């Protein structure tokens, strides 16, 4: 597998400090039509002196992402899709992908900055009978790309809410996923503090 690009951590040009991903909050709402709507808030610190940089968000190999938007401190960011040549892949942290969104973050002025990402996708039907004796709709959110940021994340919360009654009982956690739990019949949550982003969210909703 040919690796085309590795994206760097960005730094403050004046102080040389690495910008820190301090907190991440992921909210995924699953509709009865199997559409997953994703909204993510990233809280960064040490952003007061950096001069801006190009960031990227990987596109999934499992499904088409629709309505992608990104903001930085409430300012909407323009983005474009970049696709690797055939036989090559982009590398972001421990993840590889054949296509990604890129967008430029403006220069910083505050010590803390809020970055948001939103998109939706139709959850694909998968048959993992051999591996898990299960089949159903596949839900994924990539967290491991956050390993590029300096240090561990002080707080991470992922919330999956379903419109279908009592769907939480039908959630299967796949290998390579953080282990969450049902907090009510329609809500699955993973929370962690001082956490290393070394896993993703990978679920089947049966």
Image (cartoon, rainbow, N blue to C red):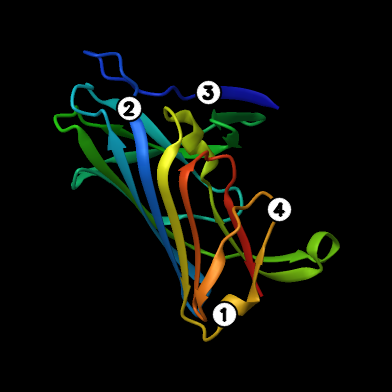
Disc nearer the start of the sequence (3/1): 3
Q: Position of residue 125 (x, y in %)?
A: 66, 68
Residue that badge 2 annotates:
19
Residue that badge 4 annotates:
175
SS under mark 3: strand
| Disc 3 from disc 1: Cα separation | 39 Å
Residue that badge 1 annotates:
167
Disc assigned to residue 5: 3
Left or right: residue 180 versus residue 25 is: right
Q: What residue is rendered at 60% in x and 48% in y? A: 61
Q: Nearer the viewer, residue 30 or 125?
A: 30
Q: Position of residue 118 (x, y in %)?
A: 36, 55
Disc nearer the start of the sequence (1/2): 2
C-beta proximity under 8 Å, tags 3 and 1: no
Which of the 4 image quarters holds residue 123?
bottom right
Residue 9 higher or lower than 63, as above or below: above
**Label 3 packing within 10 angstroms: few (<14), some (14-19), many (20+):** few
């Amino acid at each position: 597998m040919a690796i085309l690009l590795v994206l760097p951590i960005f730094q403050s040009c004046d102080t040389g400090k690495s910008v820190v991903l301090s907190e991440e909050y992921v909210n995924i709402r699953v509709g009865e039509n199997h559409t997953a709507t994703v909204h993510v808030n990233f809280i960064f610190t040490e952003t007061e002196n950096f001069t801006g940089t190009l960031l990227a968000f990987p596109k999934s190999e499992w499904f088409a992402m629709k309505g992608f938007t990104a903001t930085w401190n409430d300012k909407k960011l323009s983005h474009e899709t970049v696709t690797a040549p055939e036989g090559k892949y982009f590398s972001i942290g421990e993840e590889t992908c054949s296509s990604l969104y890129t967008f430029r973050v403006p220069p910083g002025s505050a010590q803390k900055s809020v970055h948001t990402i939103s998109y939706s996708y139709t959850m694909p039907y998968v048959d993992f009978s051999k591996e898990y004796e299960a089949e159903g709709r596949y839900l994924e959110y990539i967290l491991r790309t956050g390993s590029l940021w300096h240090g561990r994340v002080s707080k991470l919360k992922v919330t999956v809410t379903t419109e279908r009654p009592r769907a939480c009982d039908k959630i299967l956690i796949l290998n390579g996923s953080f282990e969450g739990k049902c907090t009510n019949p329609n809500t699955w949550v993973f929370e962690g503090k001082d956490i290393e982003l070394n896993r993703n969210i990978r679920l089947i909703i049966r």
